[in-house]
């Protein structure tokens, strides 16, 4: 099948770029002496996860038990569930997973850890947990060294779980300028290191210190005392990463093919891809929903559910009804989650159709 | 099953409110002497579509061939595909649909109509089409009476299709204040009426004039010369409709159950529902992603993919880890599209689990 035969909207992956992105991150992390455990929430696709493992990743990271199950079903056997797992239904699924694969889980409070401890102990299991630290994102995670040591001591008294390490998602780096990013990354790494050291000093075996973000990857790879990195979006990249200076536009491996369906005026082209294709995640004005690679000066600033609105006032192209445009989405992780399938292309040849196996696994 | 037994995040529908919303819109349209052909892109769920038909709807409206197929498979036999259908793959599917159900299709240019005409004629079919008019949304659709009459005359010469009417989506009303809305709705209705009359005067049998939006429904029901209305979001309503003055918060039938998974501080609660649960569609500051019904002064202004961030500075609640909050999403249509299932509840009893059968049918 040729890429021109695809009905639109279609999510397409450029295999050459994907392989290059995977190899580069694997090299960067290896050269920094770290292990790589990519977050698969970006692609949600076992085929891509296997490429990451083949390039040297030691395991994968997921956000939900449903994602862990989808990847365990596909043969992945080393999974970090980097989230707080709350509620008896999810804990039972977590225990079932722990019997099938090497499973690590996040905790940031006794309220999260106690039910897990109780059920694991009753089931005769001992689940390795990692303390989640907040290093500036202001989301879940312990805020201070003292909080972490206090929780570590509490956890050490519980059956059914064992503190294995600490982790953070330094997602706040994505909001920063490239100049501000480096000191903030080193600060986050220092905090993780400090907490791990304090836990060990208190007799708690926090063996592994794990960080994770694509914008911070270069600095984190060079940071001392970090054992593991969990970037995600680097496999595909997206317009957000381009605008934030992480990468150049032609490193983006993911795009959406979309067809012009109406040309109400010289200034406007309407396409068949809206927020139910690209997601509602959008950047600041200029090209909020995506970058039109056929002509980056065609602005994609407005979308309805099934309509994309291209502003052609500054564009050189005058596409006709039926013309196909290729658009890099603002947020790859969110765009992928709108699709059941993704078309893997080598140049113009469609080499494979992949199921987005973990799409919508929100529980 | 009880609603408290549901694992989260879970999309739940209050059946009492849903039935009331469906009955009220059916009454409004009937009293206005119009036919109702609701847009099912909001719920994408055959069970809800059947409730709309049972309340008197004459058929349904969809945006994509894939949605039409999902509803045709579920037994719906009168479907308006209110969009421009471009590309040979979609045209073949459209012809297959036209053999199974009464199918109407939108067109706004000869570029869209000609390939459809050619393939339909070759297949021995005659597809009823409706001219799409722009009445202020600035999306697809003919801008002027003259353009519409010129296209109508061109279409009259083509085989395989037959002009059956005109339609508009007056979606621009949703952006307006309640006061500005009424004159704009009447203006849109007048334009549709004027185009239909001009087509008929030119000998083109444009029998039906169709409009569609929830915010404009009250005014459109009373407007002369309109035959059919296609509102969508009224079945569920959402925070967008509440903030735009269409409806009160306790008319919203759709909400998301989400669990508090972290309490990093007194001011913040982190839940297990982010943009992959609520969609990335969000309103202006205050409660951008949704309204926390447990306490509307808890602000849901920030979300990551799998994390909701509640700002409790003005809230009276101090939820604990494990507590379940009920949140009305900003945009019902977009939120539903993130879920494979929806739980239909009568009070606290879960009466049914519905598949969102047309979710993700973007082609």
Image (cartoon, coloured by chain):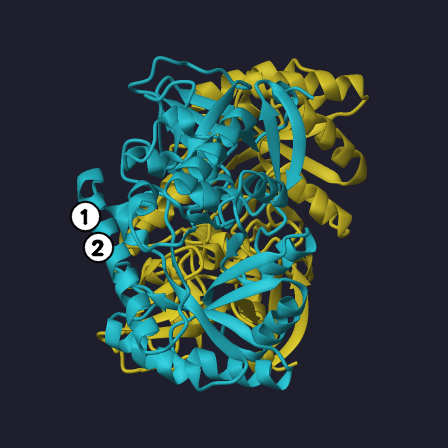
Chain colours: A cyan, B yellow
Q: Look at mark 1 in the image and give the residue it sits on.
A: A183
Image quadrant where residue A140 sits: bottom left
Pointers 2 and 1 in contact (CB under 8 A)? yes
Using the rendered image of the protein, determine whether residue A256 is visible from the camera's viewpoint. no
Residue B127 % position (x, y) = 71, 28
What residue is at 75 percent from the left and 36 percent from the top?
B97
Q: Secondary structure at mark 2?
A: helix
Q: Look at mark 2 in the image and give the residue it sits on.
A: A187
Residue A251 % position (x, y) = 41, 27
Give left or right: position of A122 versus A314.
Answer: right
Residue A211 % position (x, y) = 37, 55
Category of crowding for the residue at label 2, using alpha-carbon neighbours closer than 10 angstroms: few (below 14), some (14–19), many (at least 20)? some
What residue is at 51 percent from the left and 31 percent from the top?
A18
What residue is at 73 percent from the left and 27 percent from the top?
B92
Specify the subunit that label 1 lies on.
Answer: A
What residue is at 74 percent from the left and 46 percent from the top?
B72
**Pointers 2 and 1 within a single chain:** yes
Using the rendered image of the protein, determine whether residue A29 is visible from the camera's viewpoint. yes
- Residue A168 against residue B123 in the figure, above or below: below
Specify the subunit that label 2 lies on.
Answer: A
Quadrant placement of the C terminus of chain B: top right
Category of crowding for the residue at label 1, using alpha-carbon neighbours closer than 10 angstroms: few (below 14), some (14–19), many (at least 20)? few
Residue A304 % position (x, y) = 44, 41
Quadrant placement of the N terminus of chain B: bottom right
Q: Secondary structure at mark 1?
A: helix
């Amino acid at each position: 099948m040729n890429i021109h035969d695809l009905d639109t909207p279609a999510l397409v992956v450029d295999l050459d770029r994907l392989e290059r992105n995977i190899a580069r991150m694997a090299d960067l992390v290896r050269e920094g002496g770290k292990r790589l455990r990519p977050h698969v929430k970006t692609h949600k696709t076992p085929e891509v996860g296997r490429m990451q493992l083949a390039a040297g990743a030691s395991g994968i990271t997921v956000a939900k038990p449903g994602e862990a199950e989808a990847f365990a079903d596909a043969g992945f056997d080393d999974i970090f569930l980097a989230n707080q797992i709350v509620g008896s239904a999810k804990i039972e699924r977590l225990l079932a997973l722990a019997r099938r694969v090497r499973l690590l889980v996040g905790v940031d409070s006794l309220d999260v850890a106690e039910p897990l401890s109780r059920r694991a102990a009753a089931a005769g299991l001992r689940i390795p947990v990692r303390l989640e630290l907040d290093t500036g994102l202001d989301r879940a995670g312990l805020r201070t060294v003292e909080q972490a040591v206090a929780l570590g001591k509490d956890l050490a008294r519980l059956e059914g779980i064992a503190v294995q390490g600490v982790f953070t998602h330094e997602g706040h780096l994505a909001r920063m300028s490239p100049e501000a990013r480096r000191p903030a990354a080193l600060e986050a790494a220092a905090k993780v290191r400090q907490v791990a050291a304090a836990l060990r000093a208190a007799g708690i075996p926090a063996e592994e210190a794990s960080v994770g973000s694509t914008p911070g990857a270069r600095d984190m790879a060079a940071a001392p005392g970090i054992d593991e990195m969990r970037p995600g979006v680097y496999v595909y990249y997206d317009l957000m990463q381009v605008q934030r200076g992480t990468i150049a536009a032609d490193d983006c491996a993911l795009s959406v093919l979309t067809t012009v369906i109406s040309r109400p005026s010289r200034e406007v082209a309407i396409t068949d891809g809206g927020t139910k294709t690209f997601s509602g995640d959008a950047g600041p004005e200029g090209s909020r929903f995506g970058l039109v690679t056929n002509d980056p000066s065609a602005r994609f600033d407005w979308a309805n559910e099934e309509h994309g609105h291209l502003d052609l006032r500054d564009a050189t192209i005058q596409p006709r009804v039926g013309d196909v445009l290729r658009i890099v989405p603002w947020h790859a992780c969110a765009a992928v989650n709108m699709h059941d399938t993704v078309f893997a292309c080598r140049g113009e040849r469609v080499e494979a159709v992949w199921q987005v196996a973990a799409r919508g696994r929100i529980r």
